[in-house]
Image: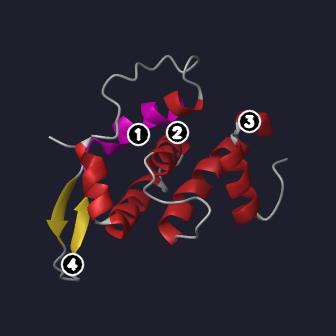
């Protein structure tokens, strides 16, 4: 079974993405691994890849996927939301240079987590730094 499934939304009549109940448990180690592959102690076997069914589902309904992912991960924060950001960016589900409310909320929450945790700017990649400057409107300090 894929990580994500689709279901019809009765409220809108359009399709929306139903996230699986184990989403948090999958994104938390994914986030830790993506940030620090060697130091995370996480085995990446079973992580999403380009052929993973969730990628196809996400690409079929990108707005629904992003809304569901933001709703599930932004309130939790931490490595879970960082994992969500990396999932979105790594698989091209949203462009960090193009404003999109739900994707931006995920990314800002992820980077705010790193900032609040005291990680220095050197730990961020150029794409993360550019996004931070665009959304936060300031340099990483």
User: Label 4 neighbourhood size at 10 Å, few (<14), some (14-19), many (20+)?
Assistant: few
Cα gap from disc 4 to disc 1, whole angstroms? 26 Å
* C-alpha gap between disc 4 and disc 2: 31 Å
* Disc 3 crowd, CA 10 A, few/some/many (<14, 14-19, 20+): some
Q: Which mark is residue 14?
A: 4
Label located before the other in sequence (3 or 2): 2
Q: Is residue 12 above or below residue 118?
A: below
Residue 32 location, x and y as percent?
52, 31
User: Do labels 4 and 2 touch, CB within 8 Å?
Assistant: no
> Residue at position x 52%, y 57% from top?
106
Q: Are marks 4 and 1 in contact (CB under 8 Å)?
A: no
Q: Identify which residue, 106 or 37, lies in the foreground.
A: 37
Give the mark, 1 or 2, whose residue is nearer the N terminus.
Answer: 1
Placement of 42 over or under 89, stated as above or below: above
How many C-alpha atoms fall within 10 Å of the one at disc 1: few (<14), some, or many (≥20)?
many
Marks 1,2: beta carbons within 8 A: yes
Callout 2: 10 Å neighbours few (<14), some, many (20+)?
many
Element on which disc 4 rests: loop
Bounds of the magenta segment:
20-32
Circle 2 sits on which residue?
79
Query: Which one is in front in this view, the residue at disc 4 or the one at disc 2?
Result: 4
Residue beneath label 1, please? 27
- Which element is circle 3 on? loop
């Amino acid at each position: 079974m894929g990580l994500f499934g689709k279901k019809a939304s009765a409220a809108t009549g359009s399709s929306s993405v139903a996230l699986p109940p184990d989403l948090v448990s999958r994104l938390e180690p994914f986030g830790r691994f993506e940030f620090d592959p060697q130091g995370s102690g996480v085995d990446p076997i079973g992580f999403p890849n380009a052929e993973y069914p969730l990628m196809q589902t996400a690409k079929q309904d990108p707005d629904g996927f992003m809304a569901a992912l933001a709703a599930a991960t932004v309130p939790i924060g931490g490595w879970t939301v960082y994992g969500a950001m990396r999932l979105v960016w790594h698989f091209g589900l949203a462009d960090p240079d193009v404003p999109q409310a739900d994707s931006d909320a995920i990314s800002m929450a992820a980077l705010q987590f790193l900032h609040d945790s005291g990680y220095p700017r050197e730990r961020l990649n150029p794409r993360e730094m550019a996004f931070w400057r665009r959304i936060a409107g300031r340099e990483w300090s």
